[in-house]
Image (tube, rainbow, N blue to C red):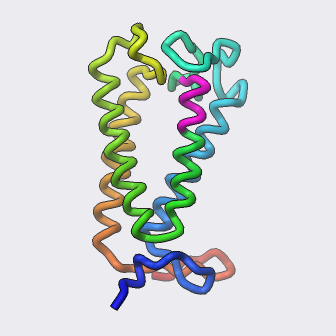
Amino acid sequence: MSDPTLAHHHPDRPRSLLQIAAAVVGAVFLLVGILGFIPGVTTDYDTLQLAGHHSEAMLLGIFQVSILHNVVHLLFGVVGLAAARSSRSAKAYLVVGGIVYLALWIYGLVIDHDSAANFVPLNTADNWLHLALGVGMTALGLLLGRRGKRVEIDPAGRTHV
């Protein structure tokens, strides 16, 4: 017998909490990727570089970004929205994505931020955000993946577990 939480989403079948979490995380990454290209939201926008630590553009005035960094956020967002179609892919997205962000956190801690190794680019704020994302995404994937609960969203947008 197949597990209904692993089935692809159909409009008449409610989404699992795991699928909703992946969709929300994906949507946030997509939004962050877009915001990284908006002057004003990204300060020092005129210094935005393709890649590398020479980009002094700062998303929300805090997080160092480059075109590469923004494009990665956009792609990560699209993958999250696509992964939200099934519980299995949503769990993989959250867990593997969380591990990637934990690895990026460690990378950001060990490299010299003023060196060519800082190609993303990363700053201290990015590092702490990557730690939070890594722990949060991995926890969501593992904890919600253990439950088989589904959430039904009615036409008014109210949720029912």
**Residue 118: quarter of image:** top left
- The residue lying toward the viewer, choosing from 107 and 125, is 107
- The residue lying toward the viewer, choosing from 51 and 38, is 51
Q: Is residue 115 left or right of residue 44?
A: left
**Residue 33: quarter of image:** top right
Q: Is residue 16 left or right of residue 69?
A: left
Question: Looking at this rendering, what residue extends furthest in the bottom direction?
Answer: 1
Q: Position of residue 37 (x, y in %)?
A: 68, 30
- Does 146 appear above or below 55? below
Magenta stretch secondary structure, dominant: helix
Q: Is residue 1 left or right of residue 157?
A: left
Q: Position of residue 121 (x, y in %)?
A: 48, 21
Q: Is residue 138 magenta?
A: no
**Residue 3: quarter of image:** bottom left
Magenta stretch?
Answer: 65-72
- The residue lying toward the viewer, choosing from 21 and 75, is 75
In the picture, which quadrant includes the N terminus?
A: bottom left
In the picture, which quadrant includes the C terminus?
A: bottom left
Q: Position of residue 159 (x, y in %)?
A: 54, 77
Q: Residue at x 42, y 20 (%)?
A: 123
Q: Residue at x 45, y 74 (%)?
A: 16
Q: Residue at x 35, y 59 (%)?
A: 140
